[in-house]
């Protein structure tokens, strides 16, 4: 019996030990890998097969970021690509305001949204279903090639169609043919997805500081979509071009692989400023005059990084965007930005750092400043008193911009004027000077009242030919290429659309502007004629011209469009300035209250543009204080303040009435007695 | 003003009282003057009113002068409180300043006199009802203006003493009260008080009692016929 007990105990011990050993064996698989640093890993192709150039396995295939970084046990590709940088508005409901105003929009983001530039006219995403090829402007495929893909990190609308299917697989499945009409489907019309592949979210684009955007974009230009990530990573050279019908092949650089065929890349958790600015600096320049340089920005000068204020994932402070691998990057709240409005103000704001000293920020004291200043005026208003680089305060889309170095040519349909309302060849400067050589052109920002606070902003003004549509509350826009072509034809042969010759320069800056009744008529008539000539479907549509909040049916007949006070136009953007912050010693108020409370102050008495061109070509302006809606100093609206005022007002009336009556009677009695 | 040196005069206000009054009218005049550009701040969008701020040398200098005058008023008020607590005449006059039923009867009597329903003016003690009104208006004014002024001068310190969220409300209420009470006080002083001591036909162009503290026997008999009786009563009361 004893032997049996000993035997059973021995068996139980062995089983326990074995189980424990087995558990220990399993443990490393269960535990997540130590975070922060990627171990050497195999590249995978789209099908999930290993790419091992060292052992010549699948060595000519492009790697798939989705299969490689999103491999089991590594990163959650689906969660990551829910980020708004990837979706760009795809799948989001059109905001009510958008639906009321913009007849062409299908999302609040760049993909199907209002416009990419500060104002119309811009390319518009075609509807999913179409019945006339003439009316299709930009398909989902064109969205990639129309330079949008140069910055778009992949995933979202570069990967899946509007029904959630992978473009390349869907084309094959539905028997669609490359570069053909494909049922005028807005995702597949003339598209070549089945050849080009799709663009997956490219992790290295942000997380590898040495990522080669130029090489990536070259592949996109050649329509080598699925090879773009491979070329951009520098792991392989890609030869061939779908666009030119040449077979495409990747040749990996074996020196970047270890003896097992794995790669160990320089991958960082937080993208560098240069990575963010690769995409954000150009629009930042045009829209906000942002330079993001130590010369202009106290935060860049202090060595801060974009991600310090715009954190994401597990580093985010706001619960709405917090979570491992959540790629919703902390953002502010721009009046014209409506992508994921529910995530507005998830970034760290000025107050966060400058009240608790986060990252060594100096604590803001504001001694002697009455508290309502901080309640009613945004930090940026005083701390961005000047902009040093131009932004586009006016974008008109009704004349032909003849200036040099504007590329691609359809962009000549936009003419820009800077913060001082001088003509600005933005694309020429972008081309020649780049961000490194932005010319210095100081101007003081226009101030707007937005959500109860005063902000410095670029309140963009626009003028453009539009379309009124029967039964719809908003406006539509003709296709950008049509207006460009109309001008192109007129410039080549002035007998074509001859009325355009009537549009002349009145302001003396050498650039024509539409500002007189006959010029307005010339635009409307010429656009109508061009659209009719080219069989654009004008059924139920009327060509109009829109200047800010004025909708012109003809040179002498116009009606007012509703808009917010902070907008110059319901059809142009409003961009708050938040970057290029001046040091406290240069802020408004640093020289005293008279920085604002004096007769020459910009804050109240600057003349800001209301309409860019009057009949003499000169701008029509209003007083800054009027734009801000000043009647008197806005008081606290709480009941305590209200009743205090009521009490003292009535006390004054009653007391003074009694005193004055007493005095009059006193004097009256005196003189009566004397007489 | 009476230039006849032989006219008998009686002492009405001692040196302490006169000093308080001088401190007060100097500070209040400075406060009212410097409040003009500050009032203009209520309409910062008006270039004319902002021009007034510029005319006064800008907001900073106006604020400095206003605060200095405010401290002077605070000193005058503190001085007065000390005078009332410490000095026998201060205590006595403070009691005489207390409103009584007779003040309302005097007001009624005076109104009847104005309308010719009575032939004689009411007889006043040391302080007439309108002088008492002046005093209590100034007293109330000092409490409100100094209190709200300090709140606005030290918003952070005040906020630190309050529950969260009340700082801004208290500041706004203080600002509103300061603004309105300033108007009431200035109008009352420059209309009512100036009328009673300067522009009243029988007073014009005014008395120098604020400087030397004396009035003529004739004035005393006419304006304060019951003062001596009142003082005697007070003494008797004290002795009891």
Image: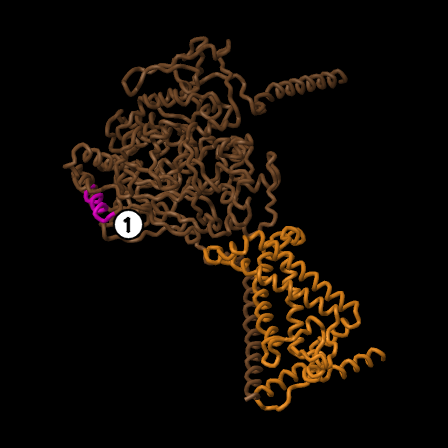
| Magenta region includes residue A571 | no
User: Where does the image place residue A14, in percent across and percent down from the top left?
Assistant: 68, 17
| Magenta region includes residue A521 | yes
Camera-side residue: A248 or A450?
Answer: A450
User: Where does the image place residue A466, in percent across and percent down from the top left?
Assistant: 26, 44
Chain identifier of the residue bearing label 1 in the image: A
Label 1's element?
strand
Query: The C terminus of chain A appears in which quarter of the rendering?
Result: bottom right
- Residue at label 1? A551
Name the residue: 77% across, 73% down. Answer: B89
Name the residue: 44% across, 52% down. Answer: A625
User: Where does the image place residue A622, in percent across and percent down from the top left?
Assistant: 38, 51
In-image side of A74 versus A15 (left or right): left
**Does residue A26 appear in this view?**
yes
Name the residue: 61% across, 76% down. Answer: B196
User: Where does the image place residue A660, in percent across and percent down from the top left?
Assistant: 55, 77
Decide: is A104 above or below A142.
Answer: below
**Does residue A541 appear in this view?**
no
In-image side of B119 versus A600 (left or right): right
Task: Provide the letter of the chain coloured brown.
Answer: A
Q: Quadrant of residue A423?
A: top left
Decide: is B224 above or below A267.
Answer: below
Camera-side residue: A434 or A313?
Answer: A434
Q: Which residues are magenta?
A: A516-526
Chain B, hue in figure: orange
């Amino acid at each position: 019996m004893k032997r049996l007990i000993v035997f059973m105990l021995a068996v139980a011990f062995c089983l326990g030990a074995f189980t424990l050993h087995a558990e220990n064996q399993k443990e490393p698989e269960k535990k997540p890998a130590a975070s922060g640093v990627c171990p050497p890993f195999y590249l995978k192709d789209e099908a999930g097969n290993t790419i091992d150039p060292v052992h010549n396995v699948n060595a000519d295939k492009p790697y798939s970021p989705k299969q490689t970084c999103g491999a089991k046990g590594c990163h959650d590709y689906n969660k990551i690509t829910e980020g708004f940088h990837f979706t760009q508005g795809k799948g989001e409901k059109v905001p009510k305001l958008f639906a009321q105003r913009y007849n062409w929009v299908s999302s609040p983001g760049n993909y199907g949204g209002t416009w990419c530039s500060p104002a119309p006219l811009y390319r518009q995403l075609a509807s999913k279903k179409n019945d006339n090829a003439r009316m299709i402007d930009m398909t989902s495929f064109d969205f990639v090639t129309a330079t949008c893909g140069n910055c778009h990190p992949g995933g979202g609308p570069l990967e899946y169609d509007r029904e959630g299917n992978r473009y390349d697989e869907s084309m094959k499945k539905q028997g669609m043919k490359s570069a053909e009409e494909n049922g005028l489907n807005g995702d597949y019309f003339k598209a070549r997805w089945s050849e080009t592949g799709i663009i997956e979210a490219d992790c290295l684009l942000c997380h590898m500081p040495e990522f080669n955007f130029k090489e990536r974009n070259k592949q996109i230009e050649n329509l080598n979509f699925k090879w773009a990530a491979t070329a951009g990573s520098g792991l392989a050279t890609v030869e061939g071009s779908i666009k030119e019908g040449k077979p495409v092949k990747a040749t990996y650089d074996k020196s970047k692989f270890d003896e097992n065929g794995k790669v160990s890349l320089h991958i960082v958790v937080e993208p560098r400023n240069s990575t963010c600015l690769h995409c954000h600096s150009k629009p930042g320049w045009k829209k906000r005059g942002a330079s993001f340089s130590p010369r202009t920005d106290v935060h860049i000068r202090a060595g801060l990084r974009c991600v310090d204020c715009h954190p994401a994932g597990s580093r985010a402070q706001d619960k709405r965007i917090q979570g491992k691998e959540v790629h919703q990057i902390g953002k502010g709240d721009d009046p014209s930005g409506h992508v994921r409005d529910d995530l507005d103000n998830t970034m760290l704001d000025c107050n966060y750092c400058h009240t608790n000293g986060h990252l060594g920020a100096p604590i803001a004291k504001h001694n002697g400043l009455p508290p309502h200043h901080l309640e009613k005026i945004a930090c940026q208003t005083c701390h961005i008193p000047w902009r040093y680089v131009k932004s586009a305060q006016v974008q008109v889309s009704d004349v032909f911009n003849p200036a040099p170095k504007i590329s691609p040519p359809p962009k000549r349909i936009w003419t820009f004027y800077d913060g001082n309302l001088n003509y600005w060849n933005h694309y020429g400067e972008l081309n020649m000077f780049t961000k490194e050589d932005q010319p210095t052109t100081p101007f003081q920002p226009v101030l707007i009242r937005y959500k109860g606070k005063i902000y410095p902003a670029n309140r963009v003004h626009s003028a453009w030919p539009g379309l009124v549509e029967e039964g719809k509350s908003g406006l539509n826009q003709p296709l950008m290429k049509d207006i460009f072509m109309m001008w192109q034809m007129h410039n080549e042969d002035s007998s074509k659309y001859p009325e355009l010759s009537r549009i002349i320069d009145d302001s003396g800056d050498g650039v024509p502007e539409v500002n007189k009744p006959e010029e307005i008529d010339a635009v409307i008539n010429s656009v109508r004629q061009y659209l009719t000539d080219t069989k654009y479907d004008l059924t139920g549509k009327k060509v109009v011209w829109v200047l800010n909040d004025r909708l012109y049916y003809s040179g002498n007949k116009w009606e007012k469009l509703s808009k917010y006070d902070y907008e110059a136009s319901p059809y142009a953007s409003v961009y708050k300035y938040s970057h290029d912050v001046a040091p406290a010693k240069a802020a408004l108020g640093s020289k005293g209250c008279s920085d604002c409370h004096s007769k020459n102050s910009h804050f109240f008495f600057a003349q800001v543009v209301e309409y860019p061109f009057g009949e003499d070509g000169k701008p029509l302006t209003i007083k800054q204080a009027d734009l801000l809606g000043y009647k008197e100093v806005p008081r606290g609206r709480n009941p305590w303040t209200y009743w205090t005022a009521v009490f003292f007002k009535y006390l004054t009336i009653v007391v003074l009435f009694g005193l004055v009556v007493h005095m009059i009677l006193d004097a009256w009695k005196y003189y009566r007695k004397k007489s | 003003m009476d230039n006849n040196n032989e006219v008998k005069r009686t002492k009405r206000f001692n040196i302490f009282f006169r000093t308080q009054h001088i401190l007060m009218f100097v500070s209040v005049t400075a406060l009212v003057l410097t409040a003009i550009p500050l009032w203009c701040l209520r309409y910062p969008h008006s270039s004319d009113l902002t021009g007034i701020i510029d005319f006064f040398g800008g907001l900073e200098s106006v604020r400095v002068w206003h605060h200095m005058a405010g401290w002077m008023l605070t000193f005058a008020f503190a001085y007065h409180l000390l005078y009332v607590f410490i000095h026998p005449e201060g205590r006595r006059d403070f009691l005489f300043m207390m409103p009584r039923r007779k003040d309302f009867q005097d007001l009624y009597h005076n109104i009847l006199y104005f309308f010719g329903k009575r032939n004689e003016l009411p007889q006043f003690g040391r302080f007439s009802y309108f002088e008492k009104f002046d005093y209590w208006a100034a007293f109330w004014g000092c409490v409100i203006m100094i209190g709200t002024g300090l709140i606005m001068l030290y918003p952070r310190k005040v906020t630190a003493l309050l529950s969260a969220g009340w700082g801004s409300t208290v500041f706004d209420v203080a600002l509103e009260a300061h603004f309105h009470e300033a108007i009431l006080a200035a109008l009352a002083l420059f209309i009512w008080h100036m009328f009673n001591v300067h522009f009243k036909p029988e007073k014009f162009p005014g008395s120098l009692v604020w400087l030397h503290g004396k009035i003529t026997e004739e004035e005393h008999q006419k304006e304060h016929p019951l003062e001596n009786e009142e003082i005697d009563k007070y003494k008797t009361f004290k002795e009891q």
